Amino acid sequence: MKFDDLRIIPPILKALKEKNYSEPTSIQEQAIPLILNGNDVLGCAQTGTGKTAAFAIPIIQHIHQAPYATDPWPKIRSLIVTPTRELAIQIGENIDQYAKHTKVKHAVIFGGVKQGKQVEKLKKGVHILIATPGRLLDLIDQGHISLKSIDLFVLDEADRMLDMGFINDIKKLLKILPTKRQSLFFSATMPDNILSLSKQILQQPQKVEVTPVSSTAETIQQYIYYTNKSSKKALLLHILEEKEMNQVLLFSRTKHGADRIVKDLKKKDIHAAAIHGDKAQNQRQKVLKDFKGGKIRVLVATDIAARGIDIDKLKYVINFDIPDAAETYIHRIGRSGRAGEEGIAISMSEPEENGYVKDIEKLANMRIKVIDKHPFPQTEKPMSAQEKKEFNKEKQRRKQEFFANRKKSGGGSGRR
């Protein structure tokens, strides 16, 4: 099937052709006709499946063909709510590309930056608003945004929205939205709490489900190195000796860990930068721009910060830490091998993470290829339950001792 077969209007087809999009992905093929027909849609799709275009294209078409499309001061007709700033920006960039030959205007709003420029753009009028929940409700309370004209509402990445504690914000939003509207609900997973929320939002929805969370893209080659905790830094440098790995997205479990990895890589003259929740929004945007532009070789990210990262032709993903949730592994490696491109996912497992690897293989119903021949093999065994208990006890003691000493020395205020 081609995009031409989906009743998409010529201005949008022209934009898609300019991006070399000819054949829709599975979710696009299923969702676009349903949305164009006015159905509410419940979509289960993970990142990398083309989900954004699946809802953005019909929204743009709906607005472009409406009588109000040429209004000099357009009202907000479609609201897209998403959990992170990076994802909001990414959706905005996609809409900008798909709508370039139409009359459709859009704006992106998110927290972490001053609201002035965002408010100025809203005053000029927009058809589509992409927003994170906090800033959206804030600007509604201030009277800068009215949702009375909303025809089409999208809740994107619903599972991540709940993981990040936005449930109360979503409930507040539902009370403000017009009851008569078309609604689209997308989530990578569909546990009971997500299905319950979808029932509050959707009316007689059509369900679209592609690439369940337990599966990984066939285009991604997966490898694992078993090593010791103390050898991970050296193993990473060994892996990065491969010159072809000129653009790598590397995952760290913690923000502190991400910063530490960047520091170690820079000591070896490897261009690296971190992206996580403690970084200012302008820093995160610059780092992402530099990574996409090839100025940064290794982008070290935590899971929440990486949710909105969508990089064309990204080939390499490295798991410096194995995630303790198997689903998280699927989402991580799904950053490569997108849109049919080839991807390579490399993981490094220390003894305490070996069990996580087994969970991943069980969920994905596959075995990850083991790389045995490397200079830093795993020689240690996982701790016993008693050893782990003692380890955590000692870790907590050292933590308390650290903060107590810092307090005695003046709380770190200006001292080095």
Image (cartoon, rainbow, N blue to C red):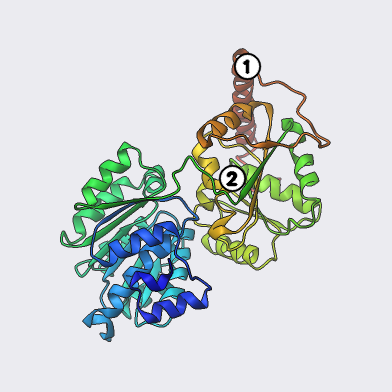
In the picture, the disc for residue 120 is: none
195 horizontally vs 340: left or right: left
Distance between the alpha carbons at the discs numbered 1 and 2: 25 Å
Q: In which quarter of the image is the C terminus?
A: top right
Displayed quadrant of residue 380: top right
| Tag 1 secondary structure | helix
Measured as percent of width and height from the top left, residue 8 is found at: 35, 74
How many neighbours does mark 2 have within 10 angstroms: few (below 14), some (14-19), or many (20 or more)? Answer: some
Q: In which quarter of the image is the N terminus?
A: bottom left
314 horizontally vs 362: left or right: right
Three-letter code for the amino acid on which mark 1 is drawn: Glu
Q: Mark 1 points at which residue?
A: 390
Q: Residue furthest front?
A: 1
- 384, above or below 105, in the image: above
Measured as percent of width and height from the top left, residue 387 is found at: 64, 15
| Tag 2 secondary structure | helix
356 horizontally vs 227: left or right: left
Q: Residue furthest left?
A: 180
Three-letter code for the amino acid on which mark 2 is drawn: Lys
Q: Mark 2 points at which residue?
A: 255
Query: Which one is in front, 332 or 360?
Result: 360
Which residue is drawn at the image coordinates 35% and 58% (left, top)?
30
Which residue is drawn at the image coordinates 75% and 50% (left, top)?
265
Displayed quadrant of residue 288: bottom right
- 409, above or below 30, in the image: above
Query: Which one is in front, 182 or 9?
Result: 9
Give the mark nearer the N terminus: 1 vs 2. Answer: 2
How many neighbours does mark 1 have within 10 angstroms: few (below 14), some (14-19), or many (20 or more)? Answer: few
Measured as percent of width and height from the top left, residue 200 is found at: 21, 48
Q: Which residue lies furthest to the right in this view?
A: 375
Which residue is drawn at the image coordinates 56% and 60% (left, top)?
284
